[in-house]
Amino acid sequence: MSTSAFPPPPPPLQRWAGAFAARFPHVLRALARMETGSVADEIAQTPLERPVYVCGLARSGSTVLLEMLAGLPDFVSWRYSDYPLQWLPYWWNALRRRLPLPATAPVERAHRDRLLVGPDSPEAFEECFWQAFFPARHDEGVDQRLDGTRRDAAFDRFYRDQVRKLLTVRGGRRYLCKGNYNALRLGYLHALWPDARFLVAARAPQAQIASLIKQDLWFRRWAAEDPRIGRQLAERGHFEFGPQKRVQHCGDAEAARAIRAAWDAGDAVTAYALQWREVYGSVLDGLERDAGLRRACLLVHYESLCADPAAGLARIAGHVGLAAEPAERLVSGWRGRLTLPDYYDDGFMPADRERIAAITAGVDGRLREFAASA
Protein backbone atom coordinates (compact mmCIF):
# COMPACT_ATOMS: atom_id res chain seq x y z
CA MET A 1 0.00 0.00 0.00
CA SER A 2 1.37 3.43 -0.86
CA THR A 3 2.74 5.42 2.04
CA SER A 4 1.67 8.64 0.34
CA ALA A 5 -2.00 8.09 1.22
CA PHE A 6 -2.63 10.64 3.96
CA PRO A 7 -4.74 9.82 7.01
CA PRO A 8 -7.97 11.84 6.95
CA PRO A 9 -7.33 15.21 8.67
CA PRO A 10 -9.45 16.26 11.65
CA PRO A 11 -11.87 19.16 11.13
CA PRO A 12 -10.32 22.65 11.41
CA LEU A 13 -12.08 23.47 14.68
CA GLN A 14 -10.84 20.26 16.25
CA ARG A 15 -7.30 20.99 15.04
CA TRP A 16 -7.41 24.46 16.56
CA ALA A 17 -8.86 23.22 19.85
CA GLY A 18 -6.28 20.44 20.06
CA ALA A 19 -3.42 22.87 19.53
CA PHE A 20 -4.87 25.23 22.16
CA ALA A 21 -5.27 22.43 24.70
CA ALA A 22 -1.69 21.25 24.15
CA ARG A 23 -0.26 24.76 24.49
CA PHE A 24 -2.37 25.93 27.44
CA PRO A 25 -3.16 22.87 29.59
CA HIS A 26 -3.44 25.09 32.68
CA VAL A 27 -6.50 26.76 31.13
CA LEU A 28 -8.14 23.39 30.53
CA ARG A 29 -7.27 22.28 34.07
CA ALA A 30 -9.00 25.37 35.44
CA LEU A 31 -12.08 24.72 33.30
CA ALA A 32 -12.07 21.08 34.39
CA ARG A 33 -12.13 22.14 38.03
CA MET A 34 -15.06 24.46 37.27
CA GLU A 35 -16.91 21.61 35.60
CA THR A 36 -16.24 19.32 38.56
CA GLY A 37 -17.58 21.92 40.95
CA SER A 38 -20.73 22.36 38.89
CA VAL A 39 -21.61 18.65 39.05
CA ALA A 40 -19.99 17.72 42.37
CA ASP A 41 -23.19 16.53 44.02
CA GLU A 42 -24.18 14.37 41.06
CA ILE A 43 -20.83 12.67 40.53
CA ALA A 44 -20.42 12.04 44.26
CA GLN A 45 -23.02 9.29 43.86
CA THR A 46 -20.99 7.52 41.14
CA PRO A 47 -18.88 4.67 42.51
CA LEU A 48 -15.37 4.04 41.25
CA GLU A 49 -14.94 0.31 41.04
CA ARG A 50 -12.87 -2.26 39.15
CA PRO A 51 -11.47 -0.14 36.31
CA VAL A 52 -9.72 -1.99 33.48
CA TYR A 53 -6.50 -0.75 31.92
CA VAL A 54 -5.08 -1.93 28.60
CA CYS A 55 -1.44 -1.14 28.01
CA GLY A 56 1.79 -2.28 26.35
CA LEU A 57 4.29 -0.96 23.86
CA ALA A 58 2.56 0.43 20.76
CA ARG A 59 1.50 -2.05 18.04
CA SER A 60 0.88 -4.77 20.59
CA GLY A 61 -2.81 -5.39 19.88
CA SER A 62 -3.97 -3.05 22.64
CA THR A 63 -6.55 -1.32 20.44
CA VAL A 64 -8.20 -4.64 19.63
CA LEU A 65 -8.45 -5.41 23.34
CA LEU A 66 -9.97 -1.98 23.94
CA GLU A 67 -12.56 -2.52 21.20
CA MET A 68 -13.48 -5.94 22.60
CA LEU A 69 -14.37 -4.61 26.02
CA ALA A 70 -15.75 -1.22 24.97
CA GLY A 71 -18.67 -2.97 23.25
CA LEU A 72 -19.81 -4.65 26.47
CA PRO A 73 -22.36 -3.27 28.97
CA ASP A 74 -21.12 -1.15 31.90
CA PHE A 75 -17.75 -0.19 30.36
CA VAL A 76 -17.07 3.45 29.53
CA SER A 77 -13.98 4.67 27.71
CA TRP A 78 -12.81 7.80 25.93
CA ARG A 79 -14.00 8.13 22.35
CA TYR A 80 -12.71 9.89 19.26
CA SER A 81 -15.50 12.43 19.72
CA ASP A 82 -14.10 13.41 23.14
CA TYR A 83 -10.89 14.86 21.73
CA PRO A 84 -9.71 17.49 22.63
CA LEU A 85 -12.46 18.19 25.20
CA GLN A 86 -11.70 15.15 27.34
CA TRP A 87 -10.84 17.79 29.94
CA LEU A 88 -14.59 18.61 30.08
CA PRO A 89 -16.28 15.23 29.65
CA TYR A 90 -19.54 16.08 31.41
CA TRP A 91 -20.29 19.38 29.68
CA TRP A 92 -19.10 18.21 26.26
CA ASN A 93 -21.01 14.91 26.26
CA ALA A 94 -24.15 16.56 27.61
CA LEU A 95 -23.94 19.16 24.85
CA ARG A 96 -23.11 16.65 22.15
CA ARG A 97 -26.28 14.68 22.87
CA ARG A 98 -28.26 17.79 21.97
CA LEU A 99 -26.42 18.62 18.75
CA PRO A 100 -27.89 17.60 15.35
CA LEU A 101 -24.79 15.63 14.37
CA PRO A 102 -24.71 13.92 10.96
CA ALA A 103 -24.23 10.17 10.73
CA THR A 104 -20.62 9.25 10.02
CA ALA A 105 -19.56 6.00 8.36
CA PRO A 106 -16.57 4.24 9.95
CA VAL A 107 -13.26 4.46 8.07
CA GLU A 108 -10.01 2.59 8.41
CA ARG A 109 -7.83 4.41 10.89
CA ALA A 110 -4.61 6.12 9.85
CA HIS A 111 -2.50 3.14 10.92
CA ARG A 112 -3.87 1.14 7.94
CA ASP A 113 -4.35 -1.93 10.14
CA ARG A 114 -7.90 -3.03 9.26
CA LEU A 115 -9.53 -1.32 12.26
CA LEU A 116 -12.52 0.84 11.34
CA VAL A 117 -13.21 3.87 13.52
CA GLY A 118 -15.80 6.61 13.83
CA PRO A 119 -16.68 9.36 16.33
CA ASP A 120 -17.99 6.86 18.89
CA SER A 121 -15.05 4.46 18.63
CA PRO A 122 -12.98 4.05 21.81
CA GLU A 123 -9.53 5.58 21.87
CA ALA A 124 -6.66 6.58 24.18
CA PHE A 125 -7.09 10.20 25.21
CA GLU A 126 -6.02 10.54 28.84
CA GLU A 127 -2.28 11.03 28.22
CA CYS A 128 -2.77 14.81 28.38
CA PHE A 129 -3.69 14.50 32.07
CA TRP A 130 -0.43 12.71 32.89
CA GLN A 131 1.58 15.21 30.87
CA ALA A 132 -0.04 18.16 32.67
CA PHE A 133 0.68 16.86 36.17
CA PHE A 134 3.94 15.03 35.45
CA PRO A 135 5.69 17.22 32.85
CA ALA A 136 8.77 14.98 32.53
CA ARG A 137 6.83 11.87 31.53
CA HIS A 138 8.21 12.04 27.98
CA ASP A 139 11.64 13.44 28.78
CA GLU A 140 14.20 10.98 27.41
CA GLY A 141 16.68 11.91 30.13
CA VAL A 142 14.31 11.10 33.01
CA ASP A 143 13.16 7.75 34.35
CA GLN A 144 9.54 7.69 33.16
CA ARG A 145 8.33 4.94 35.48
CA LEU A 146 5.80 5.83 38.18
CA ASP A 147 5.11 3.51 41.08
CA GLY A 148 2.91 3.69 44.16
CA THR A 149 5.58 5.44 46.19
CA ARG A 150 5.62 8.60 44.06
CA ARG A 151 2.07 9.87 44.28
CA ASP A 152 0.69 13.31 43.52
CA ALA A 153 -2.39 14.02 45.63
CA ALA A 154 -3.61 16.79 43.31
CA PHE A 155 -3.40 14.50 40.32
CA ASP A 156 -5.16 11.69 42.16
CA ARG A 157 -8.12 13.94 43.02
CA PHE A 158 -8.29 15.41 39.52
CA TYR A 159 -8.04 12.01 37.84
CA ARG A 160 -10.75 10.41 39.95
CA ASP A 161 -13.03 13.34 39.23
CA GLN A 162 -12.43 13.04 35.48
CA VAL A 163 -13.35 9.37 35.59
CA ARG A 164 -16.43 10.03 37.72
CA LYS A 165 -17.66 12.69 35.31
CA LEU A 166 -17.22 10.41 32.32
CA LEU A 167 -19.00 7.50 34.01
CA THR A 168 -21.84 9.74 35.19
CA VAL A 169 -22.56 11.46 31.89
CA ARG A 170 -22.36 8.17 29.96
CA GLY A 171 -24.29 6.12 32.52
CA GLY A 172 -21.55 3.52 32.94
CA ARG A 173 -20.19 1.57 35.88
CA ARG A 174 -16.61 0.66 35.00
CA TYR A 175 -13.86 2.81 33.53
CA LEU A 176 -12.02 1.26 30.60
CA CYS A 177 -8.76 2.86 29.56
CA LYS A 178 -6.24 2.18 26.84
CA GLY A 179 -2.93 3.92 27.39
CA ASN A 180 0.25 2.33 26.10
CA TYR A 181 2.43 4.48 28.35
CA ASN A 182 0.59 3.13 31.37
CA ALA A 183 2.80 0.06 31.10
CA LEU A 184 5.37 2.15 33.00
CA ARG A 185 2.74 3.31 35.54
CA LEU A 186 1.24 0.02 36.66
CA GLY A 187 2.44 0.48 40.23
CA TYR A 188 0.95 3.96 40.45
CA LEU A 189 -2.38 2.90 39.02
CA HIS A 190 -2.59 -0.16 41.24
CA ALA A 191 -1.96 2.01 44.31
CA LEU A 192 -4.67 4.40 43.10
CA TRP A 193 -7.16 1.63 42.25
CA PRO A 194 -6.40 -1.52 44.30
CA ASP A 195 -9.24 -3.40 42.58
CA ALA A 196 -8.14 -2.46 39.03
CA ARG A 197 -7.38 -5.10 36.44
CA PHE A 198 -4.65 -4.71 33.84
CA LEU A 199 -4.30 -6.31 30.41
CA VAL A 200 -0.69 -6.05 29.24
CA ALA A 201 -0.63 -6.56 25.47
CA ALA A 202 2.42 -7.92 23.65
CA ARG A 203 3.36 -9.52 20.36
CA ALA A 204 6.30 -11.60 19.20
CA PRO A 205 9.22 -9.16 19.03
CA GLN A 206 9.88 -9.49 15.30
CA ALA A 207 6.22 -8.84 14.39
CA GLN A 208 5.78 -5.96 16.82
CA ILE A 209 9.04 -4.27 15.82
CA ALA A 210 8.16 -4.62 12.13
CA SER A 211 4.83 -2.94 12.79
CA LEU A 212 6.46 -0.11 14.75
CA ILE A 213 8.93 0.51 11.94
CA LYS A 214 6.14 0.53 9.37
CA GLN A 215 4.14 3.08 11.36
CA ASP A 216 7.23 5.21 11.94
CA LEU A 217 8.00 5.24 8.22
CA TRP A 218 4.47 6.17 7.24
CA PHE A 219 4.00 8.94 9.78
CA ARG A 220 7.41 10.48 9.09
CA ARG A 221 6.64 10.59 5.37
CA TRP A 222 3.19 12.02 5.92
CA ALA A 223 4.57 14.64 8.32
CA ALA A 224 7.24 15.64 5.80
CA GLU A 225 4.46 16.51 3.36
CA ASP A 226 2.13 18.00 5.98
CA PRO A 227 3.79 19.15 9.25
CA ARG A 228 0.41 19.28 10.97
CA ILE A 229 0.43 15.48 11.20
CA GLY A 230 3.51 15.45 13.44
CA ARG A 231 2.08 18.20 15.60
CA GLN A 232 -1.20 16.33 15.99
CA LEU A 233 0.61 13.21 17.17
CA ALA A 234 2.43 15.24 19.82
CA GLU A 235 -0.75 17.05 20.89
CA ARG A 236 -2.44 13.71 21.51
CA GLY A 237 0.52 12.39 23.50
CA HIS A 238 1.71 9.87 20.90
CA PHE A 239 5.50 9.73 20.73
CA GLU A 240 5.98 6.06 19.85
CA PHE A 241 6.64 6.73 16.16
CA GLY A 242 6.73 9.60 13.69
CA PRO A 243 8.92 12.70 13.46
CA GLN A 244 8.74 13.52 17.18
CA LYS A 245 9.21 10.02 18.57
CA ARG A 246 10.84 9.83 21.97
CA VAL A 247 12.57 7.14 23.94
CA GLN A 248 10.67 5.57 26.82
CA HIS A 249 13.25 5.72 29.63
CA CYS A 250 12.57 2.65 31.76
CA GLY A 251 15.18 3.25 34.46
CA ASP A 252 18.34 2.35 32.54
CA ALA A 253 19.95 5.60 31.35
CA GLU A 254 22.52 3.79 29.23
CA ALA A 255 19.82 1.84 27.40
CA ALA A 256 17.82 5.06 26.82
CA ARG A 257 20.89 6.71 25.28
CA ALA A 258 21.50 3.66 23.10
CA ILE A 259 17.94 3.80 21.74
CA ARG A 260 18.30 7.46 20.87
CA ALA A 261 21.69 6.87 19.25
CA ALA A 262 20.27 4.05 17.11
CA TRP A 263 17.37 6.22 15.95
CA ASP A 264 19.71 9.10 15.16
CA ALA A 265 21.90 6.72 13.14
CA GLY A 266 18.89 5.49 11.15
CA ASP A 267 18.99 2.03 12.75
CA ALA A 268 15.30 1.58 13.53
CA VAL A 269 15.64 -2.18 13.99
CA THR A 270 18.09 -1.84 16.87
CA ALA A 271 16.24 1.12 18.39
CA TYR A 272 12.86 -0.56 18.51
CA ALA A 273 14.31 -3.89 19.61
CA LEU A 274 15.99 -2.16 22.55
CA GLN A 275 12.78 -0.25 23.34
CA TRP A 276 10.77 -3.49 23.26
CA ARG A 277 13.24 -5.11 25.64
CA GLU A 278 13.25 -2.14 28.02
CA VAL A 279 9.47 -1.68 28.24
CA TYR A 280 8.55 -5.31 28.74
CA GLY A 281 11.57 -5.96 30.96
CA SER A 282 10.46 -3.09 33.19
CA VAL A 283 6.91 -4.47 33.34
CA LEU A 284 8.18 -7.90 34.37
CA ASP A 285 10.52 -6.45 36.98
CA GLY A 286 7.61 -4.61 38.56
CA LEU A 287 5.44 -7.72 38.62
CA GLU A 288 8.19 -9.75 40.23
CA ARG A 289 8.53 -7.17 43.02
CA ASP A 290 4.82 -6.86 43.76
CA ALA A 291 2.70 -9.99 44.15
CA GLY A 292 -0.54 -8.00 44.35
CA LEU A 293 0.20 -6.21 41.09
CA ARG A 294 1.14 -9.50 39.49
CA ARG A 295 -2.28 -10.94 40.37
CA ALA A 296 -3.95 -7.84 38.90
CA CYS A 297 -2.16 -8.22 35.53
CA LEU A 298 -2.87 -10.56 32.65
CA LEU A 299 -0.40 -10.77 29.78
CA VAL A 300 -2.24 -11.02 26.46
CA HIS A 301 0.12 -12.37 23.83
CA TYR A 302 -1.50 -11.57 20.49
CA GLU A 303 -0.17 -14.60 18.61
CA SER A 304 -1.42 -16.93 21.34
CA LEU A 305 -4.81 -15.18 21.37
CA CYS A 306 -5.16 -15.68 17.60
CA ALA A 307 -4.06 -19.33 17.86
CA ASP A 308 -6.82 -20.19 20.35
CA PRO A 309 -9.29 -17.28 20.50
CA ALA A 310 -11.97 -18.99 22.59
CA ALA A 311 -9.56 -19.91 25.38
CA GLY A 312 -7.81 -16.55 25.30
CA LEU A 313 -11.04 -14.58 25.36
CA ALA A 314 -12.34 -16.67 28.25
CA ARG A 315 -9.17 -15.88 30.20
CA ILE A 316 -9.64 -12.17 29.55
CA ALA A 317 -13.29 -12.35 30.64
CA GLY A 318 -12.36 -14.14 33.83
CA HIS A 319 -9.52 -11.79 34.64
CA VAL A 320 -11.56 -8.60 34.32
CA GLY A 321 -14.48 -10.15 36.18
CA LEU A 322 -17.19 -10.34 33.56
CA ALA A 323 -20.50 -11.95 34.47
CA ALA A 324 -21.65 -14.99 32.49
CA GLU A 325 -23.70 -13.16 29.83
CA PRO A 326 -21.13 -10.52 28.85
CA ALA A 327 -18.38 -13.13 29.01
CA GLU A 328 -20.24 -15.28 26.50
CA ARG A 329 -20.90 -12.21 24.38
CA LEU A 330 -17.19 -11.41 24.34
CA VAL A 331 -16.20 -14.93 23.31
CA SER A 332 -18.91 -15.43 20.71
CA GLY A 333 -18.49 -11.97 19.23
CA TRP A 334 -14.71 -12.05 18.80
CA ARG A 335 -13.46 -15.62 18.46
CA GLY A 336 -14.09 -15.60 14.71
CA ARG A 337 -12.57 -12.16 14.14
CA LEU A 338 -9.06 -12.58 15.51
CA THR A 339 -6.41 -13.31 12.91
CA LEU A 340 -2.74 -12.53 12.53
CA PRO A 341 -1.99 -9.52 10.30
CA ASP A 342 -1.42 -10.43 6.67
CA TYR A 343 -1.37 -6.96 5.15
CA TYR A 344 2.39 -6.39 5.01
CA ASP A 345 5.74 -8.15 4.78
CA ASP A 346 8.20 -7.29 7.55
CA GLY A 347 10.97 -6.85 4.99
CA PHE A 348 13.69 -7.88 7.45
CA MET A 349 16.98 -9.27 6.26
CA PRO A 350 18.33 -12.37 8.05
CA ALA A 351 20.79 -10.14 9.93
CA ASP A 352 17.88 -7.98 11.18
CA ARG A 353 16.08 -11.01 12.54
CA GLU A 354 19.21 -12.24 14.25
CA ARG A 355 19.76 -8.83 15.86
CA ILE A 356 16.17 -8.63 17.09
CA ALA A 357 16.42 -12.12 18.57
CA ALA A 358 19.73 -11.36 20.26
CA ILE A 359 18.40 -8.17 21.88
CA THR A 360 14.95 -9.42 22.92
CA ALA A 361 15.46 -13.13 23.65
CA GLY A 362 15.86 -12.82 27.43
CA VAL A 363 12.76 -10.70 28.00
CA ASP A 364 10.76 -12.64 25.41
CA GLY A 365 11.48 -15.84 27.32
CA ARG A 366 10.44 -14.23 30.60
CA LEU A 367 7.20 -13.00 29.02
CA ARG A 368 6.34 -16.46 27.81
CA GLU A 369 7.06 -17.94 31.23
CA PHE A 370 4.82 -15.33 32.86
CA ALA A 371 2.01 -16.07 30.41
CA ALA A 372 2.31 -19.80 30.99
CA SER A 373 2.20 -19.40 34.78
CA ALA A 374 -0.89 -17.19 34.83
Image (tube, rainbow, N blue to C red):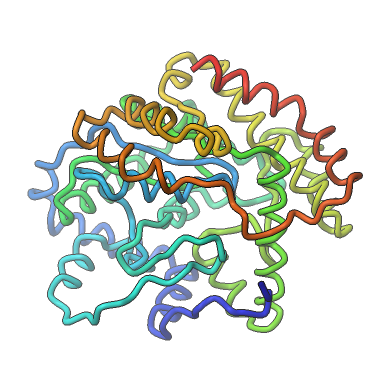
Residue 170's spot in the image, x, y percent?
Answer: 18, 55
Foreground: 187 or 315? Answer: 315
Residue 109's spot in the image, x, y percent?
Answer: 49, 67
- Residue in the picture at 66% in, 29% down: 281
Quarter that holds the N terminus: bottom right
Foreground: 66 or 226? Answer: 66
Q: How many marks?
A: 0
> Is 174 placed above or below 59 here?
above
Q: Point out the residue furthest to the front here.
A: 336
> Is 369 placed above or below 160 here?
above
> Is 94 placed above or below 14 here?
above
Quadrant of residue 335 within the rendered picture: top left
Q: Is residue 35 left or right of residue 62?
A: left
- Residue in the picture at 16% in, 82% down: 100
- Residue in the picture at 65% in, 51% down: 139
Q: In this orientation, does residue 34 appear? A: yes
Q: In this orientation, does residue 189 appear? A: no
Q: Is residue 203 left or right of residue 178?
A: right
Foreground: 108 or 277? Answer: 108
Foreground: 157 or 74? Answer: 74
Residue 348's spot in the image, x, y percent?
Answer: 82, 52
Residue 252's spot in the image, x, y percent?
Answer: 74, 33
Q: Is residue 262 left or right of residue 132?
A: right
- Residue in the picture at 39% in, 26% down: 315
